[in-house]
Amino acid sequence: MPPTLQTVVRRMGLRPLAGPASLHAVVRWVAVSELADPTPYLEGDELLLTTGMRLEADISGYVARLVARGVAGLGFGVGVSHEEVPAALVEAADQAGLPLLEVPRETPFIAIGKAVSELLAAEQYEEITRAFAAQGRLTRAALRPEGMHAVIDRLAKEVGGWAALLDETGEVRHATRGAHTDAVTAELTRLAPGTGQPAHWAAAEVRLPASLALSGPGEHIVVQPLGGGTRPRGFFAVGAKEPFSPVTHTVINAAGSLLTLAVEQGRTHLAAERRTRSAVLELLLAGATDQAHAVLGRLGGRLPDAPLVVLATDADGLDTLETRAFTVLIDDAATTAAARAAGPMAIALVARVAADTVAREVDGPVGVSLPSGYDPVALRGALDQARRALDAARSRQAGVVRFGELAGQGLLGLLEPAAAQAFSAALLAPLAEYGSRADLIESLRAYLDCNGHWDAAAKRLGVHRHTLRYRMKRVAELLGRDLDDPGVRAELWLALQAAAAPR
């Protein structure tokens, strides 16, 4: 801290005449003035030096003005205009509590200024030294296995208060004892754009201030966002009973830099891990199972034992799944064209016995495939099954849908609704556009429902069987297909079912 009057008195051999109890006041500068009112040129905490050349009769007013301005003390040089300090000045200073020092004739004012400057420079050097030492301790903490948590713990000790680490949603991830994080969360909630929820920062493209300062009775808090982009990747907060000094702010900023570096390095490492898992999946789909196991093993990971199932969920579930299983973002993997067309989606390979447990952890729709092995054909099929089950879960707004459940709902349940309806519209278009009064589509439906029995189908339609024969002949001509072919009948039946399905 800056030098006190007591330090200056001892160093320069000055004699206190009044206000000895206030010699603990800090001195931030030395000013020399012979003005009757020098206060317009002062900022406070100065040691004012004067010889009293223009000291007027209103000595009490002079002292009162100095006290109101917040000067640290008054040094009176004797032997120039006064052989001794005026008694009235001593009395006024004593009554006002203003430290009054006698400066001997042989002590130049400039010597006092130099001494205070040296003390201030030494104090600044000491602060810089403390800041460097604190930064070194924080850096060593960052290298510990606990990483960011160790930095938070060290920071709390450096500031003599508490510290806390919060994620991008405002949830506390780590805090030291006595941390007052409620005020921090409340402030983030207030500042969060749009929703008034801290979690909205995760999606907001709004740049926070470099630092937030919160002050209250006996509590001073600084909050800083973490991350180098436009969105915060987290926050850290630090609090203490006393206001933070410039040195403390330097230490806090150093901690913020280390924490931001850790966040960015963590993101880079995670991105590299995800690319590696995508490459492993490509190896599996190419039939290079041994190589896939080897690559993942070198990174300390492993694939689940067969039989396994594939779980598929929205990309938002990636963070949840990858802490529990081998997980890949489909956008990054060369799987099926249909899977890529379905948009971003997270898939996980899970041992069959653990599939239900992992699926329940996901907050959103989940598709579950049938059990599979690592044969590339079987695995590709399981990926497709999980995707189709996920589509069903999305459309039903259900939690978990298993592919086996879809098989019991008929062939149509296994097809994508949009693709099936597009196929139906294209195949049946010639019949829908036919200009006759006869309803060829309904006639075809009755014919297929009755398995090609003319009498039963005609009876259902309320027409003669010869009329129905004529209509089916017309259907065959318009479609250019043989209605006696079982494959053609199956395609037409599927098209009719898709056309009747709700959109």
Image (cartoon, rainbow, N blue to C red):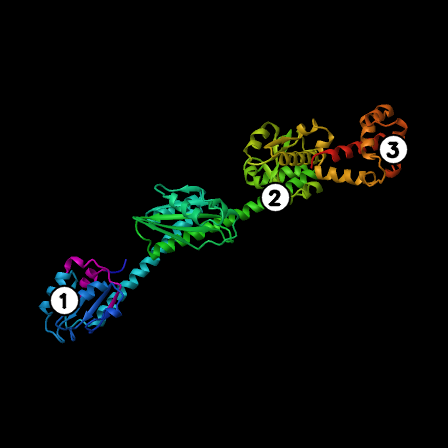
Query: Looking at this view, is 404 or 124 the one in front?
Result: 404
Mark 1, secondary structure of its residue: helix
Please report whichever mark, 2 or 1, sits nearer to the chain's N-terminal start: 1
Residue 17 appears anywhere in the view: no
Residue where numbered disc 3 is placed: 471
Q: Position of residue 44 (x, y in %)?
A: 25, 64
Q: Residues within 10 Å of mark 2 (few under 14, many from 20)?
A: some
Specify the amino acid type for callout 2.
Thr
Please report whichever mark, 2 or 3, sits nearer to the chain's N-terminal start: 2
Q: Quadrant of residue 384?
A: top right
**Magenta stretch bounds:** 4-30
User: Which residue corresponds to the image point at 58% horizontal and 29% vertical from the top-left?
Assistant: 356
Q: Residues within 10 Å of mark 3 (few under 14, many from 20)?
A: some
Circle nearer the viewer, 2 or 3: 3
Please report whichever mark, 1 or 3, sits nearer to the chain's N-terminal start: 1
Specify the amino acid type for callout 3.
Arg
Mark 3, secondary structure of its residue: helix
